[in-house]
Amino acid sequence: MKVLLVLYDGGKAAEEEPRLLGTIQNKLGIANWLKDQGHELVATADKEGEGSEFRKHIVDAEVLITTPFHPGYLTKEILSTAKNLKLCITAGVGSDHIDLNAANERNITVIEVSGSNVVSVAEHVVMSILLLVRNYTPAHEQIMGGGWDVAPMARHSFDLENKVVGTVGAGRIGYRVLQRLMPFDCKELLYFDYAPLPETAAKAIKVRRVESLEDMVSQCDIVTVNCPLHEKTRGLFNKELISKMKPGAWLVNTARGAICDAQAVADALESGQLGGYAGDVWNVQPAPADHPWRKMRHPLGGGNGMVPHMSGTTIDAQIRYSEGTKKILENYLTGKPQDPANLIVENGDYVSKAYGQRDSKAAEKKEEVRTDGKA
Ligand code: NAI
């Protein structure tokens, strides 16, 4: 079996820190285990362009493993060259780097290590909310630069207490964010998700469901995005939706960069329509040096809490998603069923309900029969 691992180059840091498992140096800790069983393993960070190692090795790989942090983007076109591909493992959470519909057409299984880094991300979201609301970053930069001037920092610094916070998506991460916000005594916690939370879960964190996204964002001081990237969420936060937010509201997106329109966010921050924008995910990764999110600022300074894609790749998370990846491979090699919670698509259909509201293939078939007039 040929396994292709697309991971980032961890350089000296990965040589010094073996727990940086999501790197080509440390190969998720599975290299020797696979080689001892006689399998071929190719690990590369070279994933862009026609002549990349990714393109070269995808042609005959049976298993592709990639992290969302440095994803090998498996487009329909690249997938058509992958003659032996049977299994795509996302070492982490979020499989939008794969054309899932194209994977279904080819009966390729896409599976991720669900839950492996959801606490890591939820903690990052809470941190990002606080650093925006408290105007932390420019104040810290001022200190590092040798300055001391309280007033320009304090004029854009608020309490999280008594603010309204809403999440788009109340799955594993969204729910954990709200849970972690409870001790801050926010005015209200809201969520928008087509899948309602079980009543007991909603009651436990005193969250109110809002049926329309526009309605929810218009009520929020802070919005946090925690849904997957799919057809219905790509470009969701565009100029129009951002204009429905309260003037000066803060937006935190650790879900996927492409859920927000990059220029619309930069324009809204620079006009003050957004009080701040923070997150770790970018519409292209690695983000180009001239990406508008690198240098965008609020008119009062600050308001930019961007970091590279790292919230879900703490050392603790890397250990969990590496172990999860090994378990998925073990199941595959020994013919054991996979944990359904990890499956995104299998046997030509969506198993996960998180990638948009869609009918299952079986339901679609029924519909076809009905519209055919043959039913
Ligand atoms: P999950 O599957 O537990 O929850 C996702 C929720 O989003 C589901 O409840 C689903 O119904 C909802 N949803 C889907 N489409 C929606 C829409 N159009 N509007 C509102 N809600 C919608 O997934 P989990 O574990 O909470 O992760 C969510 C996403 O976070 C991942 O798909 C991934 O893109 C991102 N993520 C980012 C990481 C990072 O390092 N920055 C690490 C892990 C995940």
Image (spheres, rainbow, N blue to C red):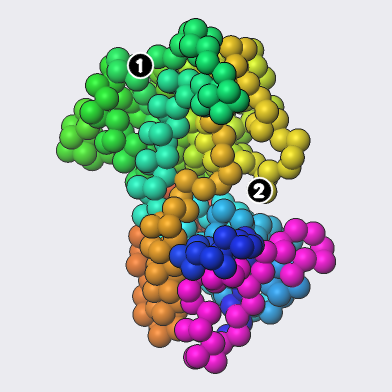
Q: Quadrant of the N terminus?
A: bottom right
Asked whether residue 149 is in view, the answer is yes
Q: Is residue 121 left or right of residue 5?
A: left
> Residue 177 in the image: x percent, y percent?
34, 37
> Residue 362 in the image: x percent, y percent?
44, 59
Q: Are marks 2 and 1 in contact (CB under 8 Å)?
A: no
Q: Which residues are magenta?
A: 24-53
**Residue beneath the point at 52% across and 15% down:** 148
Q: Is disc 2 placed on a helix, strand or loop?
A: loop
Return the disc, 2 or 1, that comes first in the chain's sequence: 1
Q: Mark 2 highlights which residue? A: 285
Q: Is residue 269 left or right of residue 247?
A: right
Specify the amino acid type for callout 1. Answer: Asp
Q: Given this view, does label 2 or label 1 mark the residue nearer the observer?
A: 1
Q: Is disc 1 placed on a helix, strand or loop?
A: loop
Residue 48 is one of the magenta-drawn residues: yes
> Eyeballing the image, is 270 above or below 79?
above
The quadrant holding residue 61 is bottom right
Residue 122 is one of the magenta-drawn residues: no
> Residue 132 in the image: x percent, y percent?
47, 24
Specify the amino acid type for callout 2. Answer: Gln
